[in-house]
């Protein structure tokens, strides 16, 4: 597996690779196979991903902005510079409190 959709061998600002667009969730997949998934997201305020569970551990790292992330029924406010691990097979959801950008790494 290779990492795709980004320049190689040069410094990058991952948060600049996705742009917030009103009323949308924008994503850019960097890698995906049966072992790992790496995706960048930009959420407009109010956008959300409804409750679901993943077959792998999912690590969210927020670059900027703020989101309400619910893991196993418990709500957390996660903001720029913070991360949260959502364990495999535990229900979780996400809602943008304000425009925000994040990376999502899922390890299966």
Image (cartoon, rainbow, N blue to C red):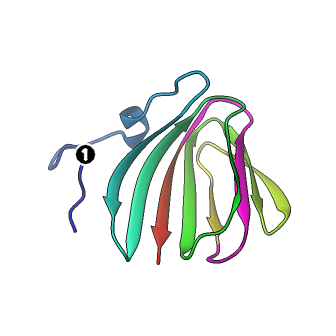
Q: Is residue 68 above or below residue 47?
A: below
Name, please, the residue furthest toward the top. Answer: 22
Q: In this view, does 83 lie to the left or right of 26?
A: right
Q: How many numbered dots are placed on residues in this image?
A: 1
Q: Residue at coordinates 38% horizontally, 77% vertically from top-left?
A: 35
Q: In this view, does 16 lie to the left or right of 45?
A: left
Q: Residue at coordinates 66% horizontally, 77% vertically from top-left?
A: 89
Q: Residue at coordinates 63% horizontally, 67% vertically from top-left?
A: 85
Q: Is residue 73 above or below residue 96?
A: below
| Image: magenta residue range | 87-101
| The N terminus sits in image quarter | bottom left
Q: Does the magenta stretch include residue 88?
A: yes
Give the quadrant of residue 12. Answer: top left
Q: Is residue 61 left or right of residue 38?
A: right
Name, please, the residue furthest toward the left. Answer: 9
Q: How busy is the neighbourhood of tag 1: few (under 14 within 10 Å), some, or many (20 plus)? A: few
Give the quadrant of residue 88. Answer: bottom right
Residue topped by disc 1: 5
Query: Residue 27 location, x and y as percent?
Result: 45, 42
Element on which disc 1 rests = loop
Name, please, the residue furthest toward the right. Answer: 74
Q: Is residue 22 above or below residue 17?
A: above
Q: Does the magenta stretch include residue 66?
A: no
Compare residues 51 and 59 and report the one nearer the observer: 51
Compare residues 69 and 33 and report the one nearer the observer: 33
Q: Residue at coordinates 68% horizontally, 29% vertically from top-left?
A: 45
Compare residues 15 and 96 and report the one nearer the observer: 96
């Amino acid at each position: 597996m290779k990492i795709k959709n980004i320049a190689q061998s040069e410094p990058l600002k991952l948060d600049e690779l996705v742009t917030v667009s009103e009323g949308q969730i924008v994503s850019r997949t960097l890698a995906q196979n049966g072992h790992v998934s790496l995706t960048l997201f930009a959420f407009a305020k109010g956008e959300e991903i409804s409750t679901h569970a993943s077959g792998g551990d999912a690590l969210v790292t927020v670059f900027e902005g703020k989101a309400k992330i619910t893991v196993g029924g418990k709500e957390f406010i996660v903001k720029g510079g913070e991360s949260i691990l959502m364990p495999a097979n535990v229900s979780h959801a996400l809602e943008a409190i304000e425009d925000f950008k994040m990376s999502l790494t899922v390890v299966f």
